Image (tube, rainbow, N blue to C red):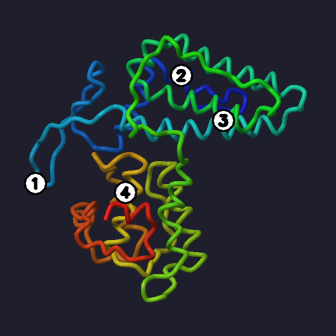
C-alpha cells in the first residue's frame, strides 16, 4: 500500500498489523536469494537456509527490523514530501484543518495498534517523526503544538533503528560527494557529468532496489578498495551490514570500469574489508569513521 497526495499516511495505516507487515517483509526477502525461510514473529526474526560460496547448505537468521528499516525510512520521507506538497497547494485558512487531520490519523494509528507497536516499536519512530515535522515545519509558530498520546505504550527503542535522522538522498550525498573533489594526487576524481550520473545511478539502486541500466561505465580516480568500501558504508547506513544485498556487488561490477577485471565473487569477498582501504584525507568522515 503506497501513500499518495490524497492519503499521505496510507502506508503506515496499512503496515501496522502482522499480515501486512509480513507482506512487506516478503517483498524485501526476494533480494536475498534464500532457498527457504520462515517467520518467527515472537522473536522478531526470520530463519533461512541458503547455499554458501562452497556449495554448502547453511542455516541462519536475520532480524525483521533490519529488513523493515530501509522501507520505513523511505516511506517516512515520502509521507513528509507528500504532506508538504499538499500543504503548499492548500489555502492558508484550511491548512490547520489539514494538519489536524494528519495528526489525528497518526494518533489513530497509535491508539488502535498499541499491542502491535509494543512488539514492533520501529513503527513508532516515523509516527513521532511525522508529528515533529508538522510542529516544526508546517504549523504556524503561533499555533498550539500537536502532542502525540503514547502513554499506554512503553517501549525501549534501539539507537540503531533511526528512521528520522537522514533521508536516503542525504546519506547518498554524505558518502559520495567527495567524488566531485580531488584525490591525494590533486586529480579530479570524477567530472561533473560523471558525478551527476553516479548520483542518479545510486539513487536508482536505492529507490528501485535493482541495478540500473548503465549506458557507460564510470572510472573514479580512487583505489578499488576505497571505491568498493564506499558502497559497503552505504549498505551499512541504509540496511546494516549483517546481510549484504547481492545486487550491490552487481552494481559495483557493472557501473565502474575499475572492476572490469574483477569477478563478482571477488567483489563480494572483499566488500567490507578495511585492511587495504587507505584513510586518505579526501575521504569523508562518514567513511573514515570505519577505518
Foreground mark, 4 or 3?
3
Q: Residues within 10 Å of mark 1 (few under 14, many from 20)?
A: few
Asked if residue 283 is positioned above or below residue 73 in the image, the reply reads below
Q: How crowded is mark 4: few (under 14 residues within 10 Å), some or many (20 or more)?
A: many
Q: Distance between the residues labelled 4 and 3?
A: 32 Å
Say whether disc 2 or disc 4 marks the residue closer to the N-terminus. 2
Question: Residue 87 appears in which quarter of the rendering?
Answer: top right
Residue at image x 80%, y 34%?
Answer: 141
Foreground mark, 1 or 4?
4
Which quadrant of the figure contains the C terminus? bottom left
Give me the disc on residue 54.
1
Say whether disc 1 or disc 2 marks the residue closer to the N-terminus. 2
Asked if residue 283 is positioned above or below residue 142 in the image, the reply reads below
Foreground mark, 1 or 2?
2
Say whether disc 4 or disc 3 marks the residue closer to the N-terminus. 3
Q: Residues within 10 Å of mark 2 (few under 14, many from 20)?
A: some
- Image x and y of residue 92, in percent: 89, 32
- Report the residue marked by disc 3: 133
Q: How many dots with numbers?
A: 4
Residue at image x 49%, y 60%?
Answer: 202
Front one among 104 and 204: 104
Q: Distance between the residues labelled 1 and 2?
A: 41 Å
Asked if residue 40 is positioned above or below residue 280 in the image, the reply reads above
Question: Residue 131 appears in which quarter of the rendering?
Answer: top right
Q: Element under label 1?
A: loop
- Report the residue marked by disc 4: 248
Q: Distance between the residues labelled 1 and 3?
A: 49 Å
Mark 1 near mark 3, Cβ–Cβ under 8 Å? no
Give left or right: position of 149 versus 61.
right
- Report the residue marked by disc 2: 14
Amino acid at each position: 500500500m503506497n501513500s499518495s497526495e490524497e492519503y499521505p499516511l496510507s502506508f503506515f495505516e496499512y503496515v501496522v498489523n502482522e499480515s501486512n507487515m509480513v507482506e512487506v517483509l516478503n517483498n524485501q526477502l526476494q533480494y536475498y536469494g534464500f532457498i527457504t525461510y520462515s517467520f518467527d514473529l515472537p522473536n522478531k526474526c526470520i530463519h533461512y537456509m541458503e547455499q554458501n560460496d562452497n556449495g554448502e547448505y547453511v542455516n541462519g537468521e536475520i532480524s525483521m527490523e533490519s529488513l523493515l528499516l530501509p522501507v520505513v525510512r523511505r516511506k517516512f520521507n515520502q509521507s513528509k514530501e507528500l504532506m508538504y506538497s499538499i500543504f503548499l497547494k492548500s489555502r492558508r485558512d484550511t491548512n490547520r484543518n489539514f494538519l489536524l487531520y494528519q495528526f489525528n490519523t497518526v494518533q489513530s494509528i497509535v491508539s488502535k495498534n498499541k499491542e502491535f507497536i509494543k512488539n514492533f516499536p520501529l513503527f513508532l519512530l516515523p509516527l513521532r517523526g511525522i508529528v515533529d515535522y508538522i510542529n516544526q515545519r508546517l504549523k504556524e509558530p503561533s499555533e498550539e503544538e500537536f502532542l502525540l498520546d503514547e502513554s499506554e505504550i512503553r517501549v525501549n527503542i534501539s539507537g540503531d533503528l533511526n528512521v528520522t535522522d537522514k533521508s536516503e538522498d542525504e546519506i547518498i550525498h554524505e558518502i559520495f560527494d567527495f567524488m566531485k573533489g580531488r584525490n591525494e594526487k590533486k586529480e579530479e576524481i570524477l567530472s561533473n557529468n560523471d558525478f551527476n550520473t553516479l548520483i542518479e545511478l545510486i539513487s536508482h539502486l536505492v529507490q528501485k532496489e535493482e541495478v540500473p541500466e548503465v549506458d557507460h561505465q564510470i572510472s573514479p580516480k580512487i583505489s578499488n578498495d576505497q571505491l568498493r568500501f564506499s558502497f559497503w558504508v552505504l549498505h551499512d547506513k541504509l540496511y546494516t551490514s549483517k546481510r549484504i544485498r547481492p545486487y550491490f556487488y552487481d552494481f559495483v561490477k557493472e557501473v565502474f570500469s575499475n572492476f572490469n577485471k574483477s569477478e563478482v565473487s571477488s567483489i563480494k569477498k572483499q566488500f567490507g574489508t578495511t585492511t587495504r582501504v587507505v584513510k586518505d584525507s579526501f575521504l569523508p568522515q562518514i567513511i573514515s569513521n570505519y577505518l
